[in-house]
Amino acid sequence: MSDKSILAAEKFGSGYNCSQSVLSVFAEDFGMTKDCCLRLASPFGSGIARMQETCGAVTGALMVIGLKYGKGEHGLESDKANAYKMSLQLISKFKERHQSINCFELLDNLDINTPEGIAEIQKRKLFRCKCSIYVQDAVEIAESILV
């Protein structure tokens, strides 16, 4: 387990969402403030605005890939193609570990937007037992791609 993955899990445990927790531990690597990263990733938690689509840990890691490899103002189309390639690597590695990048599926097909779903998630401590691992794994996979 890397230092960043531990810090991301701690950030997640302190109340930040999965996407915020992943992106924020890379802030200094890209000359950004933690606050900026926390704000930027804020809408991506719980599968994008609690829609339970793409896992927030994955979207946070994809933002990291974009910061490293993405096409900027003076970039080339090849930069964008490379960012896509690296993103697909990240997604593939995450799927190898967890079979999905879909938040709903990763939370055992429980709906966080229903009283019954959130009650079962809390009862089973899925945020702590599963999502914390997703956060750590997304960081570790991103780190392996950034080298």
Image (tube, helix red, strand yellow):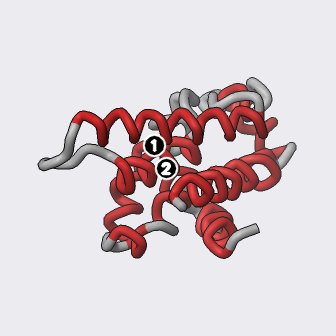
Q: Would you say the residues marked 2 and 1 are in contact, meaning their CB atoms lie under 8 Å apart?
A: yes
Indicate left or right for 94 with 143 as reference: right
Quarter residue 140 falls in: bottom right
| Furthest-right residue in this view | 124
For the residue pair 106 and 116, the one nearer the viewer reads as 106
Indicate left or right for 86 with 114 as reference: left
Using the numbered discs, state the Cα–Cα distance from disc 2 to disc 1 in whole angstroms.
8 Å
Q: Quadrant of the N terminus?
A: bottom right
Residue in the image at 32% along x and 70% along y:
32
Indicate left or right for 21 with 133 as reference: left
Discs 2/1, front: 2
Q: Where residue 107 sits in the image (x, y, percent)?
A: 74, 34
Quarter residue 135 falls in: bottom right
Q: Where residue 112 sits in the image (x, y, percent)?
A: 64, 33
Mark 2: which amino acid?
Answer: Gly
For the residue pair 120 and 107, the one nearer the viewer reads as 107
Q: Where residue 89 sits in the image (x, y, percent)?
A: 58, 38
Q: Of the numbered discs in the image, which one, if any, rests on residue 16?
A: none
Residue in the image at 70% along x and 33% along y:
95
Residue topped by disc 1 = 44
Asked whether the viewer can see residue 103, the reply is no
Residue topped by disc 2 = 60
